[in-house]
């Protein structure tokens, strides 16, 4: 009881003021962004008014069709296809590899595990150009294949490591009793471990979704044709599209592109927060 | 029959099954060799050539590096910009995260809602939408300057001036302190209360307790964050590209942006590889210094041997 009181003791009114003030600073840009989607350029610049003169969905309609032939329908479909397939491949491949590392003593394991850990700190930028050249020679540029390949080959050491740690926390007796019952190695993984790994798989999936959805560098390099553009590239393009930028259209599409992430976050908050807190995944 | 087979073969199976681990890790092993090791080695080789993607690379020794360090004044500028960016972004973001986590490490009402709100900007991470929002908010006539004007604070030319453009981009990172904050908050909750009580009996003050108890107890989390954030910061690219495109007068032209421009605007792939090796060596130096100063202690159910 005394321990609890120690923590409770110090909440003063200043703490609440501080917390709320920071909260406002954190949220204000997003709220402002939402209202800016309804404002004319004249209202956006040189004014601190939060609310627009009038609400009209025109900026959303114009923004959506900004490109004429190719609309944001395409960009949203592209982003979702790329993100969902990559995420699924990542989770499946990384968890199988993690299972191999966490539960078996094969020759060379120590050194391979050390390599895995080291590659966590291998910067992407150093691999960028040779990978581009490699995909170029394999004719895989201007497609999402580079993403799928990397995910399917579990080249996300961070997730592999996180899943290894999670499996190591599961009692081995579970596997052994399943072997006695005649389960195969793959069977143990699919029937015994995978169901228990759900929270970790979910966290990994959420973060991968978020990273791939937000990714700019890789799509910029690998994808060229506009009809394959993801939202990141489409938004960047919208800045160059007109000589005078109509910010409400740009803001409308930017805001819409954030909506899936916001929905996902509120639906799966628990996994986000646990994922960060327990495994050090970063946003 | 089934039972018998399992019983007799169990010992043999347990021995055999160790090798099957190799099968499970095979996707990663192939991925490592093809998508990490090969590009890593090739990258160094390219950095010693005049590779330009159209023609096959021609070996030119360390000429790229000589050019970078002696003839390319843009490079020194980029190096300086990147170092400043990293030095301010990483500690700044982590100090903000730690301070806020310390204040909130109490039984506040509605802590979950607060945590959610604080994390929200980090959710958008390196998203282009947020970079565009930042670009708009910090225009000369933008909302930030309008607010300053109302408060009678002199307005600032944020993105248009060589002095303020980089700090404005750094500020965007401060706004996204959420993930470090959530990690710190979780770590602080795990610090044993007995330690603070013992310190109280010894009559230790708040500052002493922070430096003698809190900081050592969460040091592994801090260490982890410093390393990961430094690696990210040294390679930073998307923010500067969208918000300022390296300008004005290359004042936000980070190494990541130079790497991209040399490679994909000028097709000087070999030269760009040399830039990437400079980034890599900086990362290696920083992480090895950090590792020297620390060692992580983590408890596992299987006792570390697995």
Image: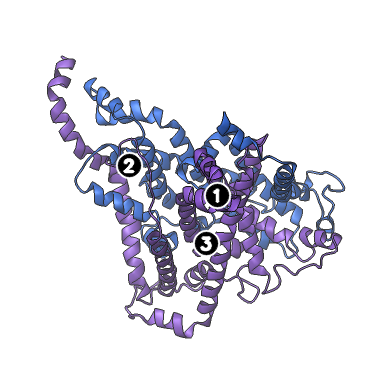
Helix, strand or loop for disc 1: helix
Chain that is purple in the image: B
Residue annotated with mark 1? B209
Helix, strand or loop for disc 2: helix
Residue at the image point whose x is 72% and y is 59% from the top: B136
Residue annotated with mark 3? B233
Q: Nearer the viewer, mark 1 or mark 3?
A: 1
Q: Nearer the viewer, residue A260 or A29?
A: A29
Q: Around disc 1, counting alpha carbons within 10 Å, would you say few (fewer than 14), some (14 to 19), or many (20 or more)?
A: some
Q: Nearer the viewer, residue B88 or B168?
A: B88
**Which color was chain A given?**
blue
Helix, strand or loop for disc 3: helix
Visible residue check, residue A81: no
Q: Is residue A24 shown above or below A218?
A: above
User: Is residue A271 shown left or right of residue B295?
Assistant: right
Q: Are marks 1 and 3 in contact (CB under 8 Å)?
A: no
Name the outermost residue toward the top. Answer: B1
User: Is residue B120 shown left or right of residue A98?
Assistant: right
User: Is residue A212 shown left or right of residue A28?
Assistant: left
Residue annotated with mark 2? A97
């Amino acid at each position: 009881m005394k321990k609890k009181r120690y923590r409770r003791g110090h909440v003063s009114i200043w703490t609440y003021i501080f917390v709320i003030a920071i909260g406002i600073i954190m949220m204000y840009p997003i709220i402002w962004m939402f209202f800016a989607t309804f404002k004319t350029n004249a209202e956006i610049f040189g004014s601190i008014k939060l609310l627009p003169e009038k609400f009209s969905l025109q900026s959303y309609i114009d923004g959506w069709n900004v490109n004429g032939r190719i609309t944001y329908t395409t960009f949203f479909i592209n982003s979702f296809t790329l993100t969902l397939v990559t995420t699924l491949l990542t989770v499946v491949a990384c968890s199988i590899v993690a299972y191999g590392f966490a539960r078996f003593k094969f020759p060379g394991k120590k050194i391979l595990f050390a390599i895995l850990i080291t590659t966590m700190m291998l910067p992407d930028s150093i691999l960028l150009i040779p990978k581009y050249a490699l995909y170029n020679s394999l004719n895989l540029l201007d497609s999402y294949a580079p993403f799928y390949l990397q995910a399917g080959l579990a080249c996300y050491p961070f997730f592999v490591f996180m899943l290894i740690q999670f499996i190591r926390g599961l009692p081995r007796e579970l596997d052994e009793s399943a072997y006695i019952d005649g389960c195969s190695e793959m069977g143990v993984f699919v029937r015994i471990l995978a169901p228990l790994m759900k929270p970790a798989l979910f966290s990994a999936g959420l973060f991968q979704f978020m990273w791939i959805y937000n990714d700019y560098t890789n799509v910029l390099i690998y994808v060229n044709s506009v009809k394959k553009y993801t939202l990141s590239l489409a938004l960047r393009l919208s800045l160059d599209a007109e000589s005078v930028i109509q910010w409400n259209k740009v803001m409308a599409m930017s805001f819409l592109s954030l909506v899936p992430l916001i929905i996902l976050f509120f639906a799966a908050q628990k996994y986000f927060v646990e994922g960060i807190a327990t495994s050090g995944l970063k946003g | 029959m089934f039972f018998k087979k399992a019983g007799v073969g169990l010992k043999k199976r347990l021995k055999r099954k160790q090798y099957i681990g190799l099968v499970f890790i095979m996707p990663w092993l192939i991925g490592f060799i093809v998508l990490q090791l090969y590009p890593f080695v090739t990258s160094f080789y390219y950095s010693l050539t005049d590779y330009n993607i159209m023609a096959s690379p021609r070996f030119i020794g360390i000429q790229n590096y000589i050019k970078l360090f002696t003839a390319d004044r843009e490079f020194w500028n980029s190096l300086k910009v990147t170092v400043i960016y990293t030095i301010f972004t990483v500690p700044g973001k982590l100090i903000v995260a730690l301070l806020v986590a310390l204040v909130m490490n109490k039984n506040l009402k509605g802590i979950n809602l607060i945590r959610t709100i604080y994390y929200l900007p980090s959710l958008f991470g390196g998203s282009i939408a947020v970079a565009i929002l930042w670009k708009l908010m910090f225009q000369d006539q933008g909302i930030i300057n309008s607010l300053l004007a109302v408060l009678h604070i002199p307005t600032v030319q944020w993105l248009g001036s060589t002095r303020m453009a980089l700090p404005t981009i750094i500020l965007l990172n401060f706004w996204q302190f959420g993930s470090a904050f959530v990690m710190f908050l979780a770590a602080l909750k795990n610090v044993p209360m007995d330690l603070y009580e013992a310190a109280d009996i010894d009559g230790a003050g708040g500052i002493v307790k922070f430096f003698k108890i809190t900081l050592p107890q969460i040091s592994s989390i801090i260490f982890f964050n410093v390393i990961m954030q430094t690696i990210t910061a040294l390679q930073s690219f998307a923010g500067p590209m969208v918000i300022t495109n390296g300008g004005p007068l290359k004042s936000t032209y980070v190494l990541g942006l130079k790497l991209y421009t040399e490679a994909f605007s000028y097709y000087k792939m070999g030269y760009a590889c040399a830039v990437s090796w400079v980034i890599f060596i900086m990362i290696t130096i920083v992480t090895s210094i950090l590792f020297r100063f620390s060692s992580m202690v983590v408890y596992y159910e299987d006792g570390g041997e697995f």
